[in-house]
Image: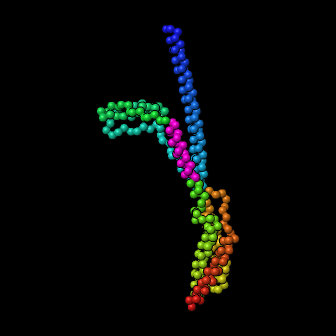
Amino acid sequence: MSFEEYAALARQLSEQRRAGEQHAATEAARRRDLHAAVDYLQQRLTAQGHRLDQLGRAIGIDQPPPGPPSSAGSAPSAPPGAGAGAGVGAYPELPTGEARLALPTAVSPAGAGVPAQRAAAVDPTVELELARRMADEADRHGQQAEVLAQRPALLPTWSPLARAVAVYAGCGVAAGVLVLALVLASGVGLVDGFTLGAWICAGLPAVAFFGGYLVLGRWGRPAMVAGTPPRYLPLGFLICFLLVPTAYCAYLLLVRGLR
């Protein structure tokens, strides 16, 4: 071998070595990026799991208890009609790790076991991108769930003030119906005038006020809002203690007008 051929071979080996080192460095950098992406995705999924647990506890949904562990030592029974030689016990039982690594076989029509087709190679970059998109979708749905959890079950699109006015007014109207029943009972002599006046001026307004207060506390409180939302007690007191006597006065005017 001449000196020129030896030098060319040395240059070729040197180029191959540099190419191998560059490929190894590129592969190492790719693996580091993949590990960093996996760690970041794992942190996102862990945070999503904690947030979902908080949402579940806020709306009163507990996690289901874990199911009973399956018995690893139990083996499926032999099919009916199979001989003793074809039983499961005729084959050695593999550990769990080795069972996953065992080569799957596909049974041919002749009955001989042949190796099944190997699964296509999975690109980790593509799988991580799909997982990232799913995590983004989960974040979007989680934000929507949080928005819904911050709304009360009663009149969710209304403001707190409008909701309180509607609830106290509704309770006042219900008390006004009871006023009509008391007036009818007073007309037939079942209720005297003092009892009727006490219920109209104090009893039924108080019942309507506390009824609205309880309704706002039970169905007007968002699941994800800490503390107690405002119930506008002075406004509710004013509405109930004005609406019930006003309903009685309106009833009297209506009766006199019909006469």
Q: Residue furthest bottom?
A: 259
Residue 230 on image: x %, y %: 67, 64
Q: Nearer the viewer, residue 144 or 253?
A: 144
Q: Residue at x 32, y 36 (%)?
A: 82
The answer to whether residue 171 is above or below residue 118 is below
Q: Quadrant of residue 99?
A: top left
- The answer to whether residue 135 is magenta is yes
Say if residue 186 shows up in the picture.
no
Determine the main secondary structure of the stretch shown in magenta.
Answer: helix
Colour theme:
rainbow
The quarter of the picture where the C terminus appears is bottom right
Segment tinted magenta in the rendering? 124-143
The answer to whether residue 121 is above or below residue 178 is above
Q: Nearer the viewer, residue 128 or 146?
A: 128
Q: Residue at x 63, y 65 (%)?
A: 160
Q: Residue furthest left?
A: 110
Residue 247 on image: x %, y %: 61, 80
Count up the numbered dots.
Answer: 0
Residue 13 on image: x %, y %: 53, 17
Q: Residue furthest front?
A: 4
Q: Residue at x 66, y 77 (%)?
A: 242
Say if residue 158 shows up in the picture.
yes
- Taking the image as shown, residue 163 lies to the left or right of residue 106, namely right
The answer to whether residue 54 is above or below residue 3 is below
Q: Residue furthest right?
A: 234
Q: Nearer the viewer, residue 258 or 89?
A: 258
Residue 33 on image: x %, y %: 57, 35
Q: Residue at x 56, y 29 (%)?
A: 26
Q: Nearer the viewer, residue 2 or 69?
A: 2
Q: Quadrant of residue 113?
A: top left
- The answer to whether residue 182 is magenta is no
Q: Quadrant of residue 209?
A: bottom right
